[in-house]
Image: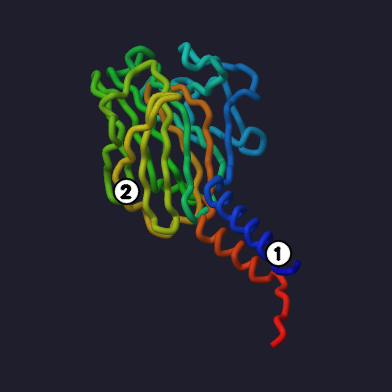
Amino acid sequence: MTRTIQAITFSMLLALASMMSTQAQAVLLGEDDFESYALTNDWNPTEGVEGWSRQSDFDNTNETAAIKHGTVVSNTTQVLKLTDSDDNNENLLWHTASSGAGINTWQYDFQLSDTLAQLGGPGNFVRSNVVVRTSGNAGFYTVDARIRNGTPSVKMYTAAGATTVPDGNLLAMDTWYTMQAELDYDLELARTRFGPLGGPFSAWSAQAATAAGLVDGYLAVQVNGGVEYDNVSLNGPIPEPSTLVLLILGLATMVPRRKVSS
């Protein structure tokens, strides 16, 4: 009987290990789809309530933050729209700290909607510039998606310099995309990919070295022109499948065994 129980228990543990190794999910550290806020053309959030805040140099004359409905059929849910008409970078901060260890994945949907010229500003230029900063306000990762004079590009900036993100030349106005950034805090590496909302991602960019000694991070969202954002999220490290298997197999050794008499 004992031998039968051992065999059944061991089989169950192996099945559990297999299931956990294939279904292990990242830990959700934060998300915002902007659906819980009232519609407004003058969104002035606070870190303690909404988890967002305007940076101290936010210019209410030439920069706006609004909660509104998306402007294209592919996304008519509530979104965050940021505008900057004087080419001076609008800054809105999302105070959701990363785990500071392992692989963290930042993801957000965005749409380039207005050039500076369309807002009465200087030049045929629109840009989404999202920065992962440390608590000391130093940026160690930036993804820049822009269209200048009709020429699109998507690049990642780290301590190693600029890294081109594949398919950045396909970036278009009035089209929703999903951007995904993977930061490895242990190896101090980053990579980026993006693709049309609901569609396939591009290939990952090459990995690039970030600044050394990273401990945490939060998002600083900067725009030139008008950009809409939705479904911002941060996921923490994914458990290592091999670690889970070893742990469960270790538990299996604790199952009592029948002493065999000589």
In the drawing, what numbered circle is on residue 4? 1
Question: Considering the image in quadrants, where does the C terminus appear?
Answer: bottom right
Q: Secondary structure at mark 1?
A: helix
Task: Please identify the quarter of the rendering in which residue 199 is found.
Answer: top left
Above-or-below relation of 237 to 43: below
- Distance between mark 2 and mark 1 Cα atoms: 50 Å
Residue 228 coordinates in the image, percent (x, y): 46, 22
Closest to the observer, 108 or 254: 254
Residue at 62% over, 23% down: 35
Q: Label 1: how many residues lie within 10 Å, few (<14), some (14-19) or many (20+)?
A: few
What amino acid is at disc 2?
A: Gln
Nearer to me, 57 or 189 = 189
Asked whether, in this view, residue 189 is left or right of residue 247, the answer is left
Q: Is residue 61 left or right of residue 150?
A: right
Q: Position of residue 95 (x, y in %)?
A: 56, 41
Instruction: Name, please, the residue furthest toward the bottom.
Output: 262
Residue 150 or residue 185, whichever sits in front:
185
Residue at the right extreme of this rendering? 1
Q: Position of residue 257 (x, y in %)?
A: 70, 74
Which type of secondary structure does the marked residue at label 2 adopt? loop
User: Which one is earlier in the sequence, the residue at label 2 or at label 1?
Assistant: 1
**x, y (%) of residue 148?**
26, 23
Label 2 sits on residue:
207
Name the residue: 63% across, 33% down: 50
Residue type of the residue flagged with mark 1? Thr
- Colour approach in the figure: rainbow
